[in-house]
Image (cartoon, rainbow, N blue to C red):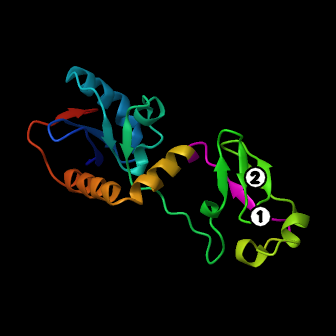
Amino acid sequence: MATSAMCSRIWISAWHSAVGLTPANLPEASVTDDLIGVLKGQSVSLLQLHIDRAYLASNLVKERSEDLSIVCKAKPVRNGKRFTKHAFTLDWLRQQIHCPNGVSLPFEAGQVVRFPAETCANCPLQQQCTTSQRGRSVSIHPDEQLFAELRQRQATPAGRAQLRQRFQVEHSKRPGESVAGQ
């Protein structure tokens, strides 16, 4: 009986990479503990981590140091022809979200902010924002700050160049790669 496996590759630099194999029915990020062991064996200090979105929930990202830069394509945010969550300003220091019309509410990462129906009904921007009779809601992902960092980097020419570099490496095979999880 044949088994299938997914190959997970994390590019460390032009000279170091680690590859892990996972069964196709397991999340790709489940191999990262094995990859961490491979990297420790190479005595590698990570400065940039070129990954795809499947790894954003991994220990490599969750437990990263402040000097580790994540290179990953940000997930697009859509809301039809209405304001996306990017039209809202998140003040992380004060834990306040500001709508495009200037209404502010407190927020917590991992929660949904619900603007009052009465406030939205009287807003001059309502047609651009929501059709809900209950008011606009905005979901704040637990990793929203990381996502904002990824979008910010992706919006620059240098950030897009890094993403193209990650794509080229991900689709190449390097001699002497270390393999974890076999």
Q: Is residue 148 above or below residue 155?
A: above
Magenta residues span 133-144
Of residue 37 and residue 69, the one placed in the foreground of this image is: 69
User: Which residue occupies the foreground of this view, 99 or 73?
Assistant: 99
Disc marking residue 136: 1
- For label 2, count other residues whose C-alpha is less than 10 Å away and answer few (under 14), some (14-19) or many (20+): some
Q: Is 134 a magenta residue?
A: yes
Within 10 Å of disc 1 (Cα), the crowding (few <14, some 14-19, many 20+) is: some
Whole-percent x and y of residue 54?
A: 42, 48
Lateral position of residue 118 relative to residue 173, left or right: right
Residue 80 visible to an observer of this rendering: yes
State the separation of the CA atoms marked 2 and 1.
8 Å
> Which image quarter is the C terminus in?
top left
Residue located at (82% from left, 65% from top): 135
The image shows residue 141 at horizontal and vertical percentages of 61, 48
Mark 2 and mark 1 lie on one chain; the one further toward the N terminus is 2
Give the amino acid type for the residue marked by disc 2 in the picture.
Val
Label pair 2/1, CB-CB below 8 angstroms:
no
Residue linked to disc 2 = 113
Of 84 and 123, nearer the camera is: 123
Point out the residue furthest to the front here. 102
Position of residue 4 measured from the top left corner of the image (x, y, whole percent): 29, 49
* Residue 107 falls in image quadrant: top right
Mark 1 residue element: loop
| Label 2 secondary element | strand
Tag of residue 35: none
Q: Is 147 placed above or below 80 here?
A: above
Q: How many marks do you count on the picture?
A: 2
Q: Is residue 33 above or below residue 122?
A: above
